[in-house]
Image (cartoon, helix red, strand yellow):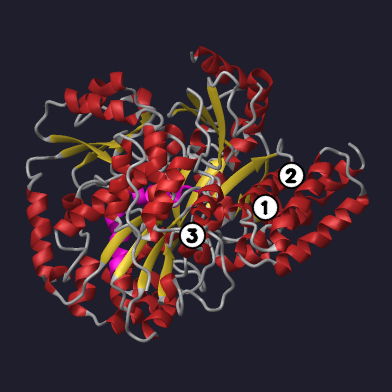
Amino acid sequence: MHLDDLAELAEQYRALDAGITHEVRVCVAAACQSTGSLPVLEALTQANTDDCCKVKGVGCMGLCSAGPMVAVAPKDGGIPESVLYREVKPEDAAEVLASVGGPLVERLHCPTDQPFFTRQMRIVREHSGIIDPDSFKGYVAVGGYAGLIKALTEMTPADVLREMTTSGLRGRGGGGYPTGLKWSTIAKMPPGQKYVICNGDEGDPGAFMDRAVLESDPHRVLEGMAIAAYAVGASKGYVYVRAEYPLAVERLTTAIKKAKRAGFIGNKIADTQFSFEVEIRLGAGAFVCGEETALMASIEGLRGQPRPRPPYPAESGLWGCPTLINNVETFANIAPIITNGGEWFAGIGTEKSKGTKVFALAGSISHIGLIEVPMGITLREIIEEIGGGCPGGKAFKAVQTGGPSGGCIPAQHLDIGVDYDSLKTLGTMMGSGGMIVMDETCDMVDVARYFMEFCMTESCGKCTPCRTGTWQMHELLDRIAKSRGTPKDLVLLEELCEVVQATSLCGLGQSAPNPVLSTLRYFRDEYEEKLAGR
Amino acid sequence: MTLPQAKPPLPSEDKRWKLVNATMRRNGYAGHALIEALHSIQDAFGFLDEISLRFVAGSLDLPLSKVYGVATFYHIFMLKPKGRHTCVVCTGTACYIKGAGDLVDTINARFGVQPGGTTEDDRLSVLAARCVGACGLAPAVVVDGELHGKLTAETLMTRLEELN
């Protein structure tokens, strides 16, 4: 199969909807489903009598706090061209359908000219909220699998690696390791069994980017994995998904089945010599499994405990074979890079952080949901403009990024541009992309204790600094938070932070002190107030 | 060379064992599919008991210690049966700063159970989840599989009292 054949196939699939002029899209991703979007979809489907209008379920549109979301869009229109409706109920179906080609329903209208929609730049989420995630044809119709076919038929693995390096893409799981470099290391390993793993163990509380990608556009992730496998010389892939994401697992299972049937996954893909099989592996509720060596142990059916690196998975990973591990969002970036070229991608973002990043906005913020913005955008733009600031007129206090491994950024640093390096200088990290906004009512010592409790429970118990250190730090924080601490406790806490950071085996322990260190750095007065018994 | 052990018979006539066995067969009775096998038991029976752990250990030719180690390591696996109703309180960051801690305290005060516990009359199991991903609805609680968002202690209590 060549690109022309694929284009023809896409044309055929588009022709299936030839008579359709408008689409009524209902979000059926997890957040909207939990607010009752499935009955809305059913009511709309039953009430629809117009042959020119198609009612369909789509992935996440982003504004989760306004769910269930429904979009009335011209057939090939994106979210900016649509009329969006918020908090739609099944009984609103007739009114919504009447607004197709008619006046909009004022009562439910959610304007798309607000910064939440206009300031975004969608690459990873370009099809999210537009295509039916369960439809293979829908994905191909919007140009899906063109990246894979281009790579297989017009590029050598070395060409793919070069494009990836040019693009400047860095791992979206939080570490920010250059993707091109990682891929090249594995490609250089002697030929033989190699593996590609997609890390979908999104464990940070308050982060739901990867889930939305898997639930909204699963083929995109598979396509990225297949391209990666071609570039590094792997023939087998695993997607490791949290068992807490049943809908993502279901959609991914369907996607694998359909891609296989169509010959885009499996033996001799698109009549080339390249073969690639994918399997799903379920997590079982262990945060530490997001760490790559622990994740591999879990795929092997063992307890998810990390091991020292080196050797890195690139040399000796799954069952001792060279293994490429990237995060869901990283894989979702691959296809457009191959289609549009690495130069195009490198033109977006900042000098050292290219492209866009998906963030999950949550906490004390008006617009809760998912956004995708170019790297380098300031935190102020994200929080005040896109997010709409803290609700109820409360004053902003801090934003927490990077989950239990990250830190808090106070108001005075809001004008910094977001990229991997700037966040690090502020004592936090990009992490996978969760942003929890805290207002003036938030007790920062309590927040530090919350994260320490998290790390303490999630510590796998293998190495002593993490196992007992997190426990001790939690005790100290608990005492201080309850105003029963002494100045000595604070000294000991700071000392322990250093030791645990320096001596833990894996990222979980090494970064567990971060929330404490960053709250101490910016909100030390709150600790001192507690010590003074106030 | 060690010969492969004969597969143990299904523990009982219960049809659910066939589902568990099918999962292991689909993975070629490979030891690395242990977590998949444990998931299938929990899906079918609701929890993992000694009989099921022994059955899986025998079928996958793994030491029981290893099977038990994996079953206890991962939070999702329950070694005790749940109550008639379950209430999962999300304790993710967004829910936490919006008062998930109060919900846990209120449940404890009213029903006398902490997360991970079950009331003495087996009526209600209370669990804490790391994040159910419904941050837009914080604080969120999942009662018998149904998500309830933007809860206060009172509305949650009303909901839980209604369960029989």
Mark 3, Cα crowd under 10 Å, few <14 / some 14-19 / many 20+, is many
Q: Tell me the amino acid under the disc marked 2.
A: Met
Secondary structure under the numbered disc 1 in the rendered image:
strand
Quarter of the rendering occupied by the N terminus of chain A: bottom left
Both labels 1 and 3 in a single chain: yes
The Cα–Cα distance between marks 2 and 1, rounded to whole angstroms, is 9 Å
- Residue to which mark 1 is pinned: A408
Percent x, y of residue B135: 51, 38
- Contact? badges 2 and 1 (CB < 8 Å): yes
Percent x, y of residue A65: 46, 35
Mark 2, Cα crowd under 10 Å, few <14 / some 14-19 / many 20+, is many
Secondary structure under the numbered disc 3 in the rendered image:
loop
Q: Is residue A525 visible?
A: yes
Q: Tell me the amino acid under the disc marked 3.
A: Leu
Residue extent of the magenta highlight: A207-226
* In this picture, residue A442 sits left or right of residue B64: right
Residue A216 magenta-drawn? yes
Instruction: State the mark number for residue A444.
Output: 2
Instruction: State the mark number for residue A302.
Output: 3
Instruction: Kindly identify the residue that appears in the image at 26 percent across and 26 percent down.
Output: A96
